[in-house]
């Protein structure tokens, strides 16, 4: 059953056929045109056809293997055609077939394969574990499914260690802070900004080694094998592997139908949950199942952008079915009060759809340990920001977090919780050991615990710490320091740094010590970051 629901690799058949046909057509046209060119131009037709055909393909990093493997086959066959004196364009066109199939085979050969099968160990006696995460879910936007989990388990104030997906989810799965696991924006090397992956031991690896069967069903295409997220999962189902490659044949702009270069392919929470339920019900052995839904992340697929609505009028013709992320990110939308209201409503609607989809998973495993949380929150106009990654404001770093199931008594966290705490808590409940981690057991969070924040995605790099009601945020260069009292000013409107230098002096050494763990300088260059993530060219 796992093989049936596991993610497939390589381009689906329709995608491969489209590539073959595109290359074939270009080969024919160029060879036909070559009859009117000088004789010396004709040998260049096959490689030129290859280059133009390759330009139609937008896949992912593994597509480089396709290009490298294909160019030799296509060019050599084309030159051979010329050397034999054959003026048949169809022979050159046929070169597209082995070039494409060979390239796809090479890409799969160079791609990370399915996770290695779990070693044969005795079936564990512990319960099934459901790790449910919703991308971009604010603490104040959690729905009734979250509320039901919280009502029968542990919950309370919680923070993410980073305001964007990659470092936050890496912390969730390792129990390490972003600077410890390293999945952050790194300093440029040879002029290129790096996004670090992580190789620390993960939850899935620990559960699989202890005999649990493991699977992940993930909607965010930036959560990939290459960055370390698939390690330990018997089944890895995500846009990283399953969804078809993008092509100019299907997308004239080459940026996806959403107008978002991230291209949130495969966003269908009900379908993703269906596959997760199919896998969960195929075997009665204890399972560790992670489901990550993209839900309320822009662009809002279910937003009402019909004419006459504030969204529809702002987006204009041609954007009737998708809210264009680029327009909002660049500030191109005129944010009238009505438009702000509709944006917030669209966000909440997407959050509700994700919550409803997850309700089916919770109902299907009544005896399971369930964790329901988010990678980060979302700014909806607070501090002049929209989306996430721009600031360390509470609207972005405060997240919902609840855990319920066998061994969990209903209560509130005794101190400030963090995503770092999920891994050690789950493994303690399951009786599975975990190596080095920075989290604490959610059943006993110290009241005086410090919560570290780091790695903003855009603009100047920022890092911060929450201690009690105090929250300190500073730029990486240290030229801007802000201090807020969350007890009296939860909206963070009044900077108290100048009036409380003793508090600033107490908290800044914590940030210095944490940054030293990275062993590499994080960087806050906007353009480099955006290019590294594929937001811009």
Image (cartoon, rainbow, N blue to C red):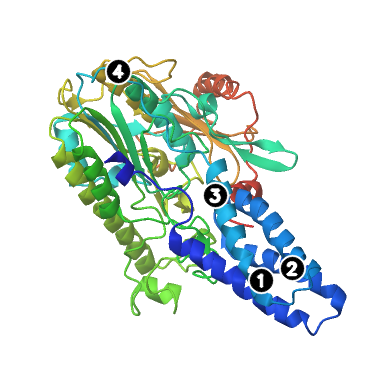
Location of mark 2 (residue):
81
User: Where, quadrant-wise, is the C terminus in this rendering?
Assistant: bottom right
Q: Secondary structure at mark 3?
A: helix
Location of mark 3 (residue):
105
Q: Nearer the viewer, mark 3 or mark 1?
A: 1
Q: CA distance from mark 4 to mark 2?
A: 57 Å
Of residues 324 and 229, the one nearer the viewer is 229
Q: Position of residue 508 (x, y in %)?
A: 55, 23
Q: Earlier in the sequence, mark 1 or mark 2?
A: 2
Of residues 216 and 26, the one nearer the viewer is 26
Q: Earlier in the sequence, mark 3 or mark 1?
A: 1
Dot 1 and dot 2 residues touching (CB under 8 Å): yes
Q: Earlier in the sequence, mark 2 or mark 3?
A: 2
Q: Earlier in the sequence, mark 4 or mark 3?
A: 3
Answer whether residue 248 is visible to the viewer in this image.
no
Instruction: Please give the name of the residue rendered at 43% of the width and 43% of the height, measured from the top-left corner.
Output: 493
Location of mark 4 (residue):
121
Residue 433 sits in which quadrant?
Answer: top left
**Above/below status of 503 relative to 280:** above
């Amino acid at each position: 059953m796992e093989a049936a629901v596991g993610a497939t690799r390589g381009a689906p058949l329709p995608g491969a056929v489209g590539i073959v046909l595109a290359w074939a057509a270009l080969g024919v046209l160029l060879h036909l045109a070559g009859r009117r060119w000088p004789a010396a131009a004709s040998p260049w037709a096959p490689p030129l056809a290859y280059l133009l055909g390759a330009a139609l393909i937008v896949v992912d990093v593994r597509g480089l293997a396709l290009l490298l493997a294909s160019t030799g086959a296509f060019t050599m066959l084309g030159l051979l055609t010329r050397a034999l004196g054959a003026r048949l364009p169809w022979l050159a066109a046929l070169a597209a077939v082995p070039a494409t199939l060979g390239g796809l085979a090479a890409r799969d050969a160079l791609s990370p394969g399915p996770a290695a099968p779990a070693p044969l160990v005795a079936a564990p006696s512990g319960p099934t574990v459901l790790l449910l995460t919703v991308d971009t879910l604010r603490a104040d936007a959690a729905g009734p499914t979250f509320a039901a989990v919280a009502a029968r388990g542990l919950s309370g104030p919680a923070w993410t260690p980073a305001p964007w997906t990659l470092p936050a989810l890496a912390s969730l799965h390792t129990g390490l802070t972003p600077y410890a696991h390293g999945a952050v924006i790194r300093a440029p090397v040879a002029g290129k900004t790096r996004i670090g992956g992580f190789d620390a031991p993960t939850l899935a690896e620990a559960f699989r080694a202890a005999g649990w069967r493991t699977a992940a069903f993930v909607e965010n295409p930036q959560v990939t094998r290459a960055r370390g997220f698939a390690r330990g999962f018997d089944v890895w189902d995500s846009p990283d592997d399953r969804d078809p490659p993008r092509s100019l044949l299907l997308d004239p702009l080459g940026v996806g139908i959403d107008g978002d270069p991230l291209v949130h392919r495969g966003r269908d929470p009900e379908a993703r949950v269906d596959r997760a339920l199919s896998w969960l019900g195929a075997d009665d052995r204890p399972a560790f199942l992670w489901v990550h839904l993209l839900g309320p992340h822009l662009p809002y697929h279910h937003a009402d952008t019909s004419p006459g609505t504030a969204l529809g009028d702002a987006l204009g013709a041609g954007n009737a079915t998708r809210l264009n992320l680029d327009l909002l990110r660049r500030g191109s939308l005129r944010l009238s009060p009505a438009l702000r209201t509709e944006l917030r409503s669209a966000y909440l609607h997407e959050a509700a759809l994700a919550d409803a989809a997850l309700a089916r998973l919770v109902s299907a495993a009544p005896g399971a340990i369930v964790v329901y949380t988010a990678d980060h929150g979302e700014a909806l106009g607070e501090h002049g920001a929209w989306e996430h990654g721009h600031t360390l404001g509470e609207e972005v770093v405060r997240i919902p977090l609840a855990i319920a199931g066998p061994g969990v008594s209903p209560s509130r966290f005794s101190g400030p919780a963090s995503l770092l705490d999920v891994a050690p808590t789950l493994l303690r409940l399951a009786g599975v050991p975990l190596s080095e981690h920075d989290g604490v057991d959610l059943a006993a969070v110290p009241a005086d615990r410090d919560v570290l924040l780091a790695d903003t995605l855009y603009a100047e790099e920022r890092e911060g710490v929450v201690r009690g009601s105090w929250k300190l945020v500073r730029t990486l260069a240290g030229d801007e320091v802000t201090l807020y009292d969350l007890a009296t000013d939860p909206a963070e409107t009044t900077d108290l740094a100048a009036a409380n230098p003793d508090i600033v002096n107490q908290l800044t050494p914590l940030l210095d010590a944490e940054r030293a763990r990275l062993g590499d300088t994080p960087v806050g260059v906007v353009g480099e970051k955006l290019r590294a993530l594929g937001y811009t060219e």
